Amino acid sequence: MVNPIMLILIPLLTVFLINLVNIKWPKFSAGLSFLAIALTTGMAFTLLPEVMQAPIEVVIAGTKAPIGINLLIGPLGLMLSLIILVTSLLVSMYSFSYISDERKGMYSGLFLLLIVGSLGMVMTGDIFNLFVFFEILCISSYILVAYQRNEHSLEASIKYLLLGSIGSLFLLISIAILYRGLGTLNIADIAARVGELPPSTRIAAAAFFTIGIGVEAAIFPLNSWLPDAHSSAPSSISAMLSGFVIEVALVVLIKIVFSLFAFAALFWLLAVVGVVSLLIGEFAAYRQENIKRMLAYSSIGQVGLILFALSLGTEAATRAAFLQIINHAAAKSALFLVSGYMIIRTGSYQIADYRGIARRMPVSGFVFFLAVLSLVGVPPLFGFFSKFSIVMAAVSSGSTGATVLTGLVLLGTVVEAAYFIRVLQHFYQREPAKAVTAARSERGAGAESSIEAPIAAMLPVLAFALFLTGGVLLLGSITGLADAAVQDLFARLVSVLA
Amino acid sequence: MLTEPVALMLLLSVAGVVLNIILYRLQSLQMIVSFLVFAAMLALNLQLYGTIGETLVLPVVVFGQAMSFAVSPLAFYFTLMITSITLLTVIFSLESLRGKACTQAYYLWLFLKTFGMLGVVFAADLLTFFLLWELMTWGTFFLMQQTGGESFSPAKKYVVYAVSSSMLLFLGIALIHAWTGSFSFREVAAAFPHMPEGMMLLVVLLMTVGFAVESAMFPLHAWLPESYASTFTSLTSYLSGISTRMGIYGLILLLFGFVGHELADRFQLIGVINLRYIVSIFGALTIIIPTFTALFQHDAKRLVTWHGIGQGGYMILGIFSANALGIAGGIFHIFNYMTYVTLILFSIAAVEYRTGTSNLNKLGGLIKRQPVAFLGLLFGIIGLAGIPPMNGFVSKWFIYKALITEGYPFLAISAIIGTLGTILSVYKLIHNIFLGQLQPEYNEIKEVPFLMQLPIWVLMLAVFATGVFPGPILSLIAEIQSSFGLAPVPYTMTGVDPAAGTLDMLVITTVFIGGLLLAWIVFLLGHKRRHVSQYQNYAAGHFLDESIPYNFNYNFYTGFEHIFNPMKKKVIARTEVAVSSLVEAAGDYLRRIYTGNLATYAMYIMAALVVTSLFLKELI
Amino acid sequence: MSTVLWIIFYPIIAFAIGVILLGYGRKFNARVQRRYGPPIQQVFYDILKLMSKRTNISHGWMHDTALVMLLGGTLLTLYFIPVPGFDFFSGYGDFLVVMYILLIPSLGMALGVGETANPNGSIGISRALQMLAGYDIPFALTFIGMAILAGTTNFSEIIALQQAEGIFGWGLMTNPFLGVAALIALHGMMGEKPFEVMVAPHEIATGPMTEMGGKYLGMMMIQHALNVVIELTIYINLFLGGAANWASYLVKLFVLMTLILSVNALFGRFRVDDAVRFMWKVPLVLAVIGVLIIIL
């Protein structure tokens, strides 16, 4: 049997290895990281049957909880790990050709660290460990955002860094409050004894925790760094940040809220904030002319939707939220990856410069089209089913408030459809924009030839598209996994405090 | 199970999509394959009659609901329309689109759309219904922008309307499911009357508005004219003919399948004014306003698409009349409308095929060059205007009669006003295209090829035959009414039962033909006629030749323009602009939350912390 | 048997009445203008002359068909309107049918005139159609009112109901608003002054008739004669209690005709938009009041 700790150790060790290899043979670094991720992904899949039986607890350094540090991998953790790993695997494949400068080695290392941070966050059973992995995640993403070293990305990175630090600080404060009150850092242990804390302490801990992790989870109004960061990072990194990093933070937030701070009021607050995020994200995206900013705002909207579903606090809604996380990971990653090569080919971020691009990049255009329809929720794509289940679950929760919020969510969908359709129509216009006519690929050739991205970059994108179309056939097993994850999450919920 | 016609039809339409993807660049193969598949579908559809009442459950389970389909009389009625009109469209397109650019995806989307419509009509549970409904609306969207370029912006408008309508339906379906715990039509219908009043009203409102958008009911019709008119004309006819009517299908399903008249009447406001009546008022407005808008159009296709909106109003008036005759008339009108509007648009397409324009100010006198298209248009407009002996009259008669019987004089007069407005604008249509002076540049054009004439002849026959013998269709409609537990319409083969009203189309037609014969004899009594050219014409002493335009078609109804111009407030267009600029302004404003100023951002975080703490403190 | 005889001879009788009414109209007009005027049978002579002309100009097959449609449609309408002793067909088509078959001749004429490719003709048709929308809306509303009042749309039943109560059962008496509204609308329908914009000889060279000559014009005049009878009879049937016998029918026809001719003699010509505005103001408002009285 595979020890789950390997999931974290392999990428982490590969980082060191890459740094060594990088000195002499920088061009192997990308391949190494791809192999490491592939290995880890394979291992994660082999864990699947066992985890579905019972969560695995791994004790590190020989001491048991509450004193020792432990990993706790249940279906929830594994599901998220799989999302993280599969997405990263495809993105790292895309990076082979996309990241072509001499700093490849650094990129690959940070890329792996980002994965380590994410995996650690979802697997750890210890709240301080959570903070450590959170920091790994954040710091690697700060650097990756600045990777392109231009004015925008540096500015975005600085902002992200400062705001992220405030978040980390709050997180730390929250952990400190809990530790001072209970003398333990093990989450299960805290959960069992959290009732001993005086209410005001609990509230303070809850507030600091929510806000702290909320910065990374891009909850409104803590997401102000996001449009800059996601739009100025390399597209592959944007795909990762949008595809799973915010969602991981979000699920961790909800997990902790479930086990430690199950206040009904907090659920309501988060649901409302989720819908507000959704509306702000979608409305702001409506006015974007820069494709990556548009996608970034759309991510704010989507994360709002997921937060809304998660904080409804019913099993059906949570399951639906997990489906939506999967849909968003696939669709948004595909969108960012496709736009990455469009930017390279045309040299522009402006949607107006992409007029008619789908005729010269037919595969990219088609994938973009599918991903957009899936995000909007068009059958028979995967997104239809996730959105459908969110709405069904929200409305069946029976409260008027949830129904009203659902109405607003649906309004957001209309706006989303409007701006995405505008982009799609631009892509399929007959008269190409100047930037499109002028675009040349490395294969050379004239104004009519294909300027499609290289095959190594297209394969992962096609894989995402294939998932969005064919994912429906896997819906049964995905729902099974999501169900197990829901059970895992709800097992932590003792009772909701009114 | 897969040998059942329902399954085969759905399978064939999916196969059509796949085959068209495989044959993406091979236009002629696409054409032949599509034709064969649609012909097979029509053949299957005819077999379907024997299986009415059967259900089919696919082994696809989504959210605990197996996708289920059923063949109800209503479904049969609609699928018959869908498959036959699609086949005619395909036959027409074989010639009209041959060799044209940008048609690779034409049949693909046609199949997708047909699949969606068939699925919606066969669906026996709300989940299947909604899933395919969505698919269908997106199919419409893709069909609309087939010609690219100018068709994109109206298609985008359609998406906004269609997605909004889907979302309303979505919320309605979610509420129904939350209350009844089931998607199945039968269980939903059984549980519906036990819903709390407020919830029921909300659901009915959401779904009515949702379907009203799709059926282009005033004031939610503004997406239709531009988007239908800017695609290929063969698609304009297909979309106007059947696609818009899926909204009516939804309304029929909602009103008779779930709610029922008794419940619909339960939402009383003041006196006779209940929900049904309010919808009818919107139906009446749907007739009048778009019909009079059509009057002032300068483009043949746009003129007809505006009528498409207006005719929907008749269906609504009929279906919501709570009268056996009226309901039958409303449902019958769907069929009639489909036949004559496709006929009209095919004829216009035939003209466009030869002249390259559908601009009413640039054509004229084509009767001498394209007599078949002229006859097609003539039959079509007689149907559209609702003049005997064509089928449009029969269904409209049912509706007038029902409204008068039920005592709704103002709804009845709106229907008649609509008819009068229709007569005016269809005369303008036929006059400006086919009558008046032939323009010199069209002197050499010919009639369209046989494959394009064929659908025109078929539809002419249909428009006339179902006008004189409405019985066969009415028998189907009576079955539909019985299947919903309504009183069936008292029909005879040629009209209505004398106990219920006075209408016998066969007698009327016979007398008409007799009158024509008599008039013909009178005509023959005079001396032989002599044909002259269009330039040998009274021109107050001037001599006419090709260089002198001697024609009247621009601003055809000058008097009405004097009357109506001050009334054209473009309220809806302005509302649309207002809403879109509101969204834009909201976007701009909300975007400014992200000022780019780090201090502000930090403030947000602090503020969020304070608010969260206070909120939690207050509520715990 | 008598039905067959009626079917054969009724068009001839109606034609005779129509010709006499038209002749009477010309005489009446002349006398109002202090002329002597043509003899009453002059219209008949005119028709005879036109039908036997040797020069018949045709602009195409629709032009020919139009005349057939014009006269055929008029004959069709004629049969469906009951007159004393002959209401065989009113059991197969009610007033709603009549209202729409009345449009067949107009449509036929409009198509034929269109094909003559003379703008004067097209302008005339455009005006005629606008007038149609003008007068038909109030007229249809008065009919709907009467149908709701009578509980039926069948002509014979409406007539029977009116006759059951003598002169006070007439539509004009039971609901004068509707009666007056319909009378004004009828005036427009007859195309008499001030509503004769469609012909307007001084402006558009007699509009639809510009390119008509010989037997074409002859047939138009035959149709006109029949049409006058049809329109007056519709009004009589709806508002003047129909007619129990031919004597009262003829009296009612002539009285109504005289009324319309008198108004005609007094007025000039309205512009088309003014005419339509008038129709949508006065008679329509009257009709709405009448209908409101009935349903409230």
Image (spheres, rainbow, N blue to C red):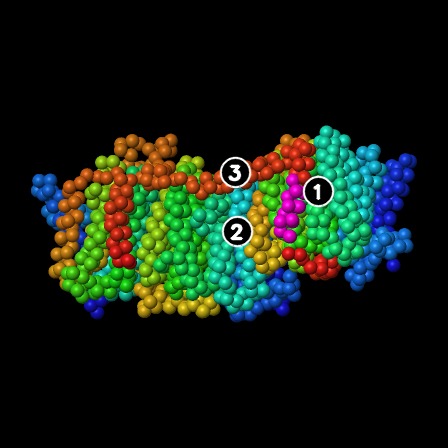
Amino acid type for the residue under numbered disc 2: Ser
- Return the chain for callout 1: A
Magenta span: predominant SS is: helix
Q: Nearer the viewer, residue B346 or A21?
A: A21
Q: Amino acid at mark 1?
A: Val
Q: Chain of mark 2?
A: B
* Disc sitting over residue B426 in the figure: none
Which residue has dot 1 on it? A215
Q: CA distance from mark 1 to mark 3?
A: 31 Å
Decide if residue A300 is on the left or right side of residue B308: right
The magenta span reads: B607-620
Disc 2 versus disc 3: distance between alpha carbons?
A: 20 Å
Q: In the displayed structure, would residue B506 be above or below residue C273?
A: below
Quarter of the image for residue B57 reads bottom right
Residue under label 2: B165
Q: Is residue B114 left or right of residue C241?
A: right
Measured as percent of width and height from the top left, residue C156 is found at 23, 64
With respect to residue A466, does A433 lie above or below? above
Q: Estimate the x, y position of residue B71 in percent, counting from the top left.
A: 54, 66
Disc 2/disc 1 C-alpha distance (Å): 35 Å
The residue beneath circle 3 is B581
Q: Earlier in the sequence, mark 2 or mark 3?
A: 2
Image quarter where the N terminus of chain A lies is: bottom right
| Residue B389: in magenta span | no
Badge 3: chain ID: B
Residue at left offset 41%, top offset 52%: B282
Q: Are marks 2 and 3 in contact (CB under 8 Å)?
A: no
